[in-house]
Image (cartoon, rainbow, N blue to C red):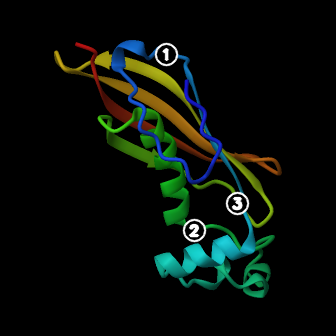
Amino acid sequence: MTTRTSPNSISTDQTWWDDVRVGDLIEGYDLTLDWTKMVEQVSGSQDFYPVHHDPEFAAEAGHPAIFYNTGWTQAALCRVVTDWAGPAGWMSKFRFEMRRMNIPDDQVHARGKVTGKSDLDDAHGLVELEVWLENDRLGVTTPGWATVRLPRRK
């Protein structure tokens, strides 16, 4: 299991199908969210819906604060998968559910777990994953599921 706690680290380690076991945990990474980073992400994605950058609008809409958008949430979960899989891994299926909000000052933890494993061919196997974002305020905010093709050791 590889731990990456820096939000700027990029994995070059390869995960091999032969080494994966059902039940393995994926430690992922941690982020502390702040208003500036959130607004930068909104600007970069050009998702200018005010709940993502205007605290007053978000409050009037019934939200506790501005919150990260769908694109950021998807990317945060996909990063758990791709960092774990390594450069020869291939995510063939992915889905997630945005159930709760991640807001400024939340400490977000991106994690995962191996839930299944199956043969594909002589060179590759498939791995089923549960991935999630959780924060210290609400617990799991965003569960997700992925299927990853990994190389076999020769």
Tags 2 and 3 touching, CB below 8 Å: no
Q: Which residue is disc 1 drawn over?
A: 22
Is label 3 in a helix, a strand or a loop? loop
Residue at x 49%, y 15% (from the top left corner): 22
- Three-letter amino acid code of the residue under disc 1: Val
Q: Residue at x 50, y 77 (%)?
A: 44
Above or below, 141 relative to 111? below
- In the rendered view, tell whether residue 75 sits above or below residue 17: below
The residues bearing labels 1 and 2 have C-alpha atoms spaced at a distance of 31 Å
* Quadrant of the rendered image containing residue 4: top right
Residue 117 point in image, percent of width and height: 38, 18
- Residue 107 drawn at (x, y percent): 77, 52
Say what secondary structure mark 2 lies in.
Answer: loop
Residue 120 figure quarter: top left
Q: Residue placed at 16% from the left, 15% from the top?
A: 122
The residue at which mark 2 appears reads as 69
Q: Position of residue 71 (x, y in %)?
A: 49, 65
Residue type, label 2: Asn
Q: Earlier in the sequence, mark 2 or mark 3?
A: 2
Q: Which of the pair 16/61 is nearer the observer? A: 16
Q: Secondary structure at mark 1?
A: loop
Upstream in sequence: badge 1 or badge 2: 1
Read off the residue under disc 3: 102
Query: Badges 1 and 3: C-beta atoms under 8 Å apart?
Result: no
Q: What is the three-letter code of the residue carrying label 3?
A: Asn
| Whether residue 107 is situated above or below residue 49 in the rendered picture | above
Location of the C terminus (image quadrant): top left
Residue 148 as seen in the image, left or right of residue 68: left
